[in-house]
Image (cartoon, grey):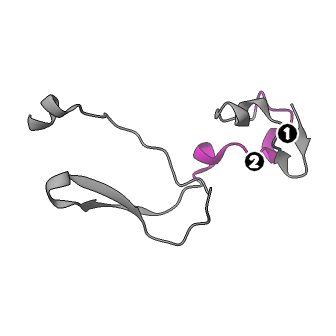
């Protein structure tokens, strides 16, 4: 695992596989920069009504291209189940 200045770098296997490191298993320890969800590092969002299409999520601040916004947690419903 590559250790970069200030935490895990592009060579971090967990980062490459889109897994978060843990403080206990990462050689960077508390300096690890691959723990965004654990540290609460997300962008402010809001759920909005999108009319006939249902609901959507928007960001409430400017974000750079490629920036991590947050984690979607929920159930994806297939069409027949959306009429419940």
Q: Per the image, is 6 magenta?
A: no
Mark 1 touching mark 2, by CB under 8 A? yes
> Secondary structure beneath disc 1?
loop
Give x and y (percent) for residue 40.
57, 51
Query: Mark 1 — residue?
Result: 28
From the top left corner, tell me how far across and down residue 21 is, in percent. 71, 34
Specify the quadrant of the image occupied by residue 9: top right
Q: Locate residue 69 relative to residue 24 in the image: left or right.
A: left
Q: How would you rate the neighbour count of disc 1 (Cα within 10 Å): few for under 14, some for 14-19, many for 20 or more?
A: many
Segment tinted magenta in the rendering:
24-40
The outermost residue toward the left is 84
Residue 39 visible within the image: yes
Q: Residue at x 90, y 40 (%)?
A: 3
**Residue visible at 54% across and 72% down in the picture:** 62
Identify the image quadrant of the C terminus.
top left
- Measured as percent of width and height from the top left, residue 28 is found at 85, 39
Using residue 13 as the reference point, say whether residue 47 is left or right of it: left
Whole-number angstrom distance, CA of label 1 to CA of label 2: 9 Å
* Residue found 67% across the figure and 30% down from its top: 17
Q: Secondary structure at mark 2?
A: loop
Which residue is tagged 2?
Answer: 33
Residue 50, percent across and down? 22, 60
Residue 22, can we see it?
A: no
Compared to residue 37, the image places residue 12 above or below, namely above
**Where 48 sits versus 4, above or below?**
below
Q: Quadrant of residue 51?
A: bottom left
Q: Earlier in the sequence, mark 1 or mark 2?
A: 1
């Amino acid at each position: 695992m590559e250790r970069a200045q200030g935490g895990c770098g592009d060579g971090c296997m967990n980062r490459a596989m889109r897994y978060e490191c843990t403080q206990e298993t990462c050689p960077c320890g508390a300096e690890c920069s691959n723990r965004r969800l654990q540290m609460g590092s997300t962008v402010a969002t809001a759920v909005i009504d999108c009319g006939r299409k249902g609901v959507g999520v928007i960001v409430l601040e400017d974000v750079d291209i490629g920036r991590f916004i947050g984690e979607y947690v929920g159930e994806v419903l297939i069409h027949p189940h959306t009429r419940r």
